[in-house]
Image (cartoon, rainbow, N blue to C red):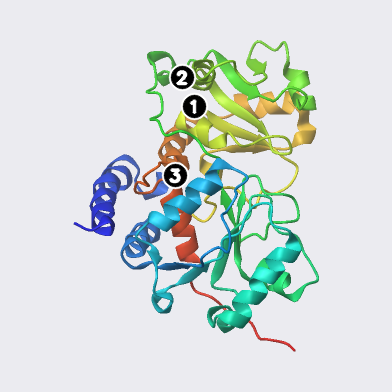
Amino acid sequence: MSIAFFHLLLYITLFSSLTIRSFPSPNSPYLSPKIIFPNYQNMLINFKIFIYEPNSPLTFKSPAELLFYTSLRNSPFATRNAQEAHLFFVPFSADLSTRSIARLVRGLRTDLPYWNRTLGADHFYVSCAGIGYESDRNLVELKKNSVQISCFPATPGKFIPHKDISLPPLATPHAPHAPTNETASGSFRFLGYFRHTVGTESTLARELIGDPDFVIESEPSDEMTNAERLSSSKFCLFDYEIDISGIGEALRFGCVPAVITDRPINDLPFIDVLRWQEIAVFLRRGGGARELKRVLDGTSQDRYVRMKELGVVSSQHFMWNESPEPLDCFNTLMYQLWLRRHTIRYVRRE
């Protein structure tokens, strides 16, 4: 039995229960369920990626980058036949200078035929911090044409919406806590949980300290404490400008994310797949603690339960596994790349 066929069997088993029984189309966490699932199946069978061999051993800035690269190389998507590839992966180390990256792209242009066919539009690369706008032609084409996979949240000014992809932070795979009788009935110890790193607490966090409806703390002392906070809180608060990396973990524990931001967020993980407005609450920073409590308290029980349930289903896409599993983080990233395989040929200007 091939790996792709095995994935397909698991996919059919998993989603026959999720999409048909548990979540009819109006209450699905997915943007287009009728399109996504057949398209995902097609990807498992057909998607091929050619990986350029790096000139030297690679170094990575985050564990997620390393796991992505290792998973890709060992996956059935990788091919040694460039002629059958839909996309081409350009690997380079996290600490490589922009001059060296430009030299790398120049080598692809002059030594191999694939880059010039689309000026890099059917290529992608991983850069946790992202690549900025440079004057060098090779970097311009890489930045503007190729798909960038960068760590979430993306560095401001280094992410192009609808082209680039966010790489969710690494989280150990484990099932969400089953709702206790207390949480299932809608009774929680806390309305909101706001975790921050020492020295980075926001103005809103300072306003909420002492409010019995909220628990505000720096990084918990252990994983069990964190799990208890997540499972006993109705909402998990995230200040987008400071730290939003735990949003997938919150979903997994059934803690509905409440994201504080003053601008649209275009780099949310799996933004091509998930209906974020149905699994998270987004609030303006300027409203302060009073507005925050008004919005959270004003969320109806029916809407809250629906958001929580859809969020738990969505959380499977944030799970990293050493051996990728259907619709986990790696395979959902692959699906987003699959959506970008139809390239536009950019006119070459001398």
For marks 1 and 2 on the same chain, the one whose residue lies earlier in the sequence: 2
Residue 106 at x, y percent in the picture:
67, 75
Name the mark nearer the viewer: 3 or 2.
Answer: 3
CA gap between label 3 and label 2 equals 25 Å
- Contact between labelled residues 2 and 3, with CB atoms less than 8 Å apart: no
For marks 3 and 1 on the same chain, the one whose residue lies earlier in the sequence: 1
Name the residue located 73 percent from the left edge and 15 percent from the top edge. Answer: 209
Mark 1 burial class by Cα count in 10 Å: few <14, some 14-19, many 20+: few
Mark 2 burial class by Cα count in 10 Å: few <14, some 14-19, many 20+: few
**Amino acid identity at mark 2:** Gly
Q: Secondary structure at mark 3?
A: helix
For residue 184, above or below residue 74: above
Residue 260 at x, y percent in the picture:
69, 35
**Amino acid identity at mark 3:** His
Quadrant where the C terminus is found in the figure: bottom right
| Disc marking residue 301 | 1
Mark 3 burial class by Cα count in 10 Å: few <14, some 14-19, many 20+: many
For marks 3 and 2 on the same chain, the one whose residue lies earlier in the sequence: 2
- Contact between labelled residues 2 and 1, with CB atoms less than 8 Å apart: yes
| Disc marking residue 317 | 3
